[in-house]
Amino acid sequence: MITEPALMSALEACQADRDEGRSPDEAGFAALLDRWPDHPGALEAAGEAYDEVDDVDRAIDCYRGALDGLQGTALRRCYLRLGDVLRRAGRIGEAIEVLEAGLDEFPGSRSLRTFLALALHEQGRPDAALGLVLEVLVDPMPSPDLELFRPAVRERAKRLSARDRAA
């Protein structure tokens, strides 16, 4: 949670510039990190901005830097985003480690299990992946994170189905 007014104001300005279509650096995220290089909220926000434009190395660095200082929902989402960007970067083993660490912290997280299933599938472990997906399906708990990432999960499902049809 960000309570420092100057940081909150700077983040809002960066987000507004991103909403206008500017790159993360044009929007001021690099300057934000220069001013608050160790603030977990600044690192997480910058990680998201770099992640959105597929600047995976910078996103990974930011997410890793943010992990130690976050709590609750922000921490769970940071594990999720870091694990996913590592998976997309082809760093599957690291992705699995991060997502499993997230599940150690948040054992009931349906979103972490879903993204771990994607990583396990890419690692060639379809039974483990399917097992996690089935757990998510039968778990009656709502998952705000799954709602937030629904478009990404839906797109990944389409690509997996298309890949299977093409095989």
Image (spheres, grey):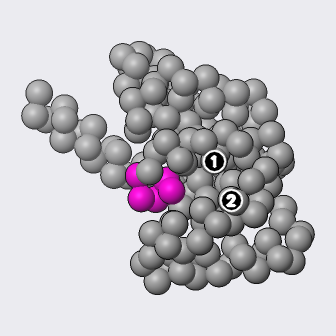
Q: Are marks 1 and 2 in contact (CB under 8 Å)?
A: yes
Identify the secondary structure beneath mark 2. helix
* Magenta span of residues: 50-54
Q: Which residue is mark 1?
A: 62
Quadrant including the N terminus: bottom right
What's under tag 1, amino acid-wise?
Answer: Cys
Identify the secondary structure beneath mark 1. helix
N-terminal of the two: label 1 or label 2? 2
Q: Which mark is residue 33?
A: 2
The image shows residue 59 at horizontal and vertical percentages of 54, 48
| Location of residue 99 by image quarter | top right
Q: Is residue 148 visible?
A: no
86 w.r.t. 141: above or below: above
What residue sits 45% from the left and 33% below the top? 87
In this picture, residue 20 sits left or right of residue 155 = right
Q: CA distance from mark 1 to mark 2?
A: 9 Å
The image shows residue 112 at horizontal and vertical percentages of 61, 38
Could you say which is closer to the camera, residue 5 or residue 146?
5
